[in-house]
Amino acid sequence: MRRRRTGMTRRSLVVSAAGLVAAMTTGGDAVASSAAEAVRGGGEDAGAARGGRDARVARGGGGDARAARGELRGVWIATVANLDWPSKRGLTAAAQKAELLAHLDRAVELRLNAVVLQVRPTADALWPSPHEPWADCLTGVQGKDPGWDPLGTAVREAHDRGLELHAWFNPYRVANHTDPTRLTASHPARRNPEWVLPYGGKLYYNPGLPEVRRFVQDAMLDAVRRYAIDAVHWDDYFYPYPVTGQEFKDDAAYERYGSAFPDRAAWRRDNVDRLVREMGERIRETRQGVRFGISPFAVWRNASTDPRGSDTRAGVQTYDDLHADTRKWVEQGWIDYICPQIYWHIGLASADYAKVLAWWTRTVRGTGVGLYVGEALYKAGDPAQPAPWQDPAELSRHLTLAKDHDEVGGHVFFSAKHVAADRIGAMARVVADHYQDRVRAPR
């Protein structure tokens, strides 16, 4: 979930191979990346942003049926680069907690029922992890104990308010810079430098190494063991978004492990498939009832690339560019829910919200995998966005449209600071039109 205006974008715009379509970043921490992650494409009209099988997930139709079956109403709380919370590094423990509780209270006021809290933003942790250091978004110093347990507190306080807590992890991102010496001396990436590759101004764990795959799973599963979280949640970062003129130099790993595959792309997709499938299995083994959800960039493939794809002209396709076969994960039932970041307005020529939504409803139909929709609240009232986003009713129209699709089980809004500020009243309009009563989240 990502794009940000203050130097970081949830998925910064990526220029298509032809250079004609800019991929627009989506909503979680990508919108917020860093000053170095500048927009690389034009406006929305220039192109699309690139930027389990049980019946627990409700897919009710409209009105009372949907409410009776449950409906997810969520908000992302991004911590990378202090995008949403804490508001800045180095606050006291009491001030950090007060800000967190204010976000939870705001969610309750708006009749939401879930928060998606980013707890592993850059191979670090918002809990006392034995695997990775404390996140620097808390104290400003990676590895420094903040004096409290943010994740443990968030789980308890969310549940006390009737909110679900979905713990949001980023599997492979290590740092938003390329200098390993800036990491704490005990960081796994410094102890195992062969695990790490620089790309696009960032450091990443190499998804092609089996030991990396096992380690990142172990790091995330520690939180599943310790806390009564309701779900493990991943966003859209797998292999990194393409950067023109740069190469992700995983040649050695490919030479060692990729001989059975027709090409490097197939090998990379298999690496990510293994991560997803194994993580789902290990979550179920670790704690019953914890769901596994993923919030990908919303275009699997354009129909011009693959007739099974969506009627879009996106500059990024997850299958080809991120090596993330999101459609397969749904069809195989490896995840419990999918939350595509459909961060575009209704009628956008290159990626029409209505057409992308319809593609996802067809994709999940009959699979038992829940469908929630990632919504770009951060665009509402942004003067850099086209006219539809200046209308406070645009997001409400998204929810009205979704009611025509029984498969849609709810919506998640990016992000918490925009929910709090509600620049032009778009969130208030959603609440007035669709959230007049509190409902339970689907199980």
Image (cartoon, rainbow, N blue to C red):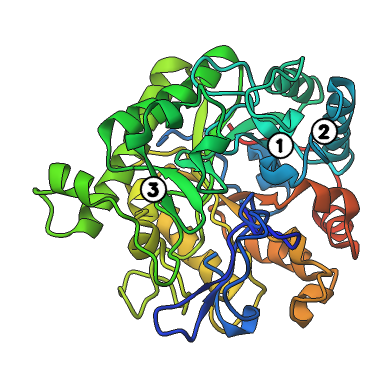
Which amino acid does the dot numbered 2 rest on? Answer: Leu
> Mark 2 highlights which residue?
104
- 365 shown above or below 91: below
- 180 shown above or below 220: below
Which amino acid does the dot numbered 3 rest on? Answer: Val
The answer to whether residue 261 is left or right of residue 198 is left
- Measured in 3D between alpha carbons, the distance from the residue under mark 2 to the one under mark 1, in whole angstroms, is 8 Å
The quarter of the rendered structure image containing the C terminus is top right
Kindly report which numbered mark, 3 or 2, lies closer to the viewer in this rendering.
Answer: 2
The answer to whether residue 261 is left or right of residue 337 is left
Which amino acid does the dot numbered 1 rest on? Answer: Val
- Measured in 3D between alpha carbons, the distance from the residue under mark 3 to the one under mark 2, in whole angstroms, is 30 Å
* Residue 403 visible: no
Instruction: Mark 3: give few (<14), some (14-19) or many (20+) Cα within 10 Å.
Output: many
What residue appears at the point 52 percent right and 23 percent down from the top-left corner? 132
- 435 shown above or below 121: below
- 410 shown above or below 405: above
N-terminal of the pair, mark 3 or mark 2, is: 2
> Mark 3 highlights which residue?
330
What residue appears at the point 58 percent right and 58 percent down from the top-left corner? 341
- Measured in 3D between alpha carbons, the distance from the residue under mark 1 to the one under mark 3, in whole angstroms, is 23 Å
Residue 45 x/y as whole percent = 63, 84
